[in-house]
Amino acid sequence: MRKTGAFLKPYTWIIIAALLLMLVELVVELWHPLLLAQVIDEGILQNDTGAVIRLGGWMVGVALAGFAAGIINSYLAAHVSQGFGYDIRKRMFATIQTLSFAGFSRFSTATLITRLTSDVTQLQNLVFMGLRIMPRAPLMMIGGLALSLMVNFQLALILLVVTPLLFVLLVWIMNRAFRMFQSVQERLDQTNGVLRENLGGMRLIRAFVRKGYEITRFGQANTELKDRTVRALRTIEMTLPLMLLVMNLSILLVLWLGQDAVRNSGVDVGQVVAIVNYATRITGAFHVISFILTGLSRARASSSRVEEILVSEPDITDSPQADPARKIVRGELSFEGVSFKYPGTQTPVLQELTFSVRAGQTAAILGATGSGKSSLFQLIPRLYDTDQGVIRIDGKDIRTYTLEQLRRGIGYVPQEALLFTGSVEQNLRWGKEEAAVEEIRQAASDAQIDETIRRLPNGYETMLGQKGVNLSGGQKQRLSIARALIRRPRLLMLDDSTSALDARTEARLMDALGGYPCTTLLITQKISTAMEADTILLLEDGRLLAQGSHEELLRTTPLYRQIVESQADQEVAT
């Protein structure tokens, strides 16, 4: 927990103040039994009303001081714990943002959500307990034992024997609970994963009438989470009644021996009452320690999961030779012997790719599913790094650009059109936050979506649901294209981003793209689209099978002719 503990450093002085106030509370609690013993021995048994009033006044005054200290301590503990949680979540989120796709793939979305929420909450609770009750409970046990021995050594020997044995038992059980709670958090990951898939795929579930199956699947994950949680809590909760039983028997034994000592050994009644008071406080401390160790067990499990994120280092960073002032100017692109395989796999998805696309050209990329088209796209903005070979833009190795400058010069439209909750205009400003209204309208018009937006209830201020759920597939694709165009990129990459568009809309879009001074890479399955490109790249099993114009590939490449003929046959059939 050292890594997460470092986030408490900015709150050092507040923590010190909170702990000092907690010590005030502790002193008050330990002082009360002594004052009560004096009230009994010097006041009540001596029929001295003045002593009762004087000592009672001390008890009330001390209690009020402890109350005030406790209120301020609670305020400071809440401030530190909430600030601590805020800082950790902020750092975790920032760390996640720096991870490459390879780094990001080590963690599922469900586990990241759980770690950012539930696991951080466990750590927050631990910090709050640490400043509010955690040191006080063991100090109460130690102080209670020490003062009870000072009051009457013989009667307090019972507590001196029983308390350490119970404490050792409690620590042993909590070590077992730590492993159980680690398993609980893993099951929570799985449950969140099933829940996320269901909520994200609700339309598909209903379309395929899979409601019953999904309810059963969630029920199984939920049941496993419940069973493991119950098992962990049961292990802890079984120890508390046992400890309370032993401590209560100890109190009864103190009372039994105490009444005999009062009669025969001249022990004061107040001493017996004080020791019973201390025994009761030690019993309460055991209850608090049980609660603390439960939280500590859960927090230890959560801390290891949080630190796994915090220690993650981005594996794609600016190279030492990167020039911060270098920008993409023309958009000329070349691959030189590029090979790539995804981390953790052995089979290359791209093998010795070599090709070039001149500045301002449109290049269509064709190939069967799994031929490496999208993987090729992900290498250009360095979402992944090549295993071998060099990618150049404007004749410069892409590693000589900073990541920010490289990606700012690229407009990327992924295969799945992803929009965010917010207005249409806010989604478009993802491409260029400071864009003027005219730039937004122009990009939307070129993407053939401006008229559609104007017909929405609130135009560009219309709020979109999660992932643009209130738009059609074609509308989402055109908004995504507009978002890329608004930044006026020098290199525009469209990953099958016109698949949901009709031929007429797509033709107008391609004409509009001709007015942008950029190099365009277009992954497509449509021969009609590829025919309009300046050059066509045909991929097969991660290798470049051929490059050339439509007419050149028809003459020289049998696979391309087959693709053209098959699509022609489909058009005739329809």
Image (cartoon, helix red, strand yellow):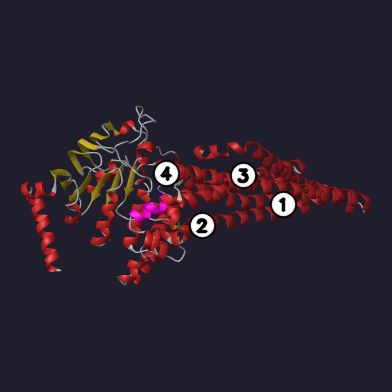
Q: Is residue 356 above or below residue 444?
A: above
Residue 378: x and y in percent read 29, 44
Look at discs 4 and 1 and give the one toward the viewer. 4
Q: Which residue is mark 2?
A: 233
Nearest to viewer (mark 1 / mark 2) = 2
Residues marked 2 and 4 touching at CB (< 8 Å) = no
> What residue lies at 61% left-to-right and 47% top-to-bottom?
128
445 falls in the magenta region: yes
Q: Residue at x 67, y 41 (%)?
A: 19
Residues under numbered marks 2 and 3 in contact, where contact means CB atoms less than 8 Å apart: no
- Marks 2 and 3 sit apart, C-alpha to C-alpha, by 27 Å
Q: Is residue 474 left or right of residue 236?
A: left
From the viewer's perspective, is the residue at label 1 or at label 3 nearer? 3
Q: Which mark is residue 568?
A: none
Callout 1 amino acid: Val
Q: Which residue is mark 4?
A: 97
Type of amino acid under label 2:
Leu
Magenta-tinted stretch:
439-446
Q: Is residue 176 visible?
A: no
What's the distance in space between the residues labelled 1 and 2, CA to CA?
A: 32 Å
**Relative to residue 283, is residue 572 drawn left or right?**
left
Between marks 4 and 1, how big is the CA–CA gap?
61 Å
What SS does tag 1 mark? helix
> Hey, what amino acid is under mark 4?
Gln
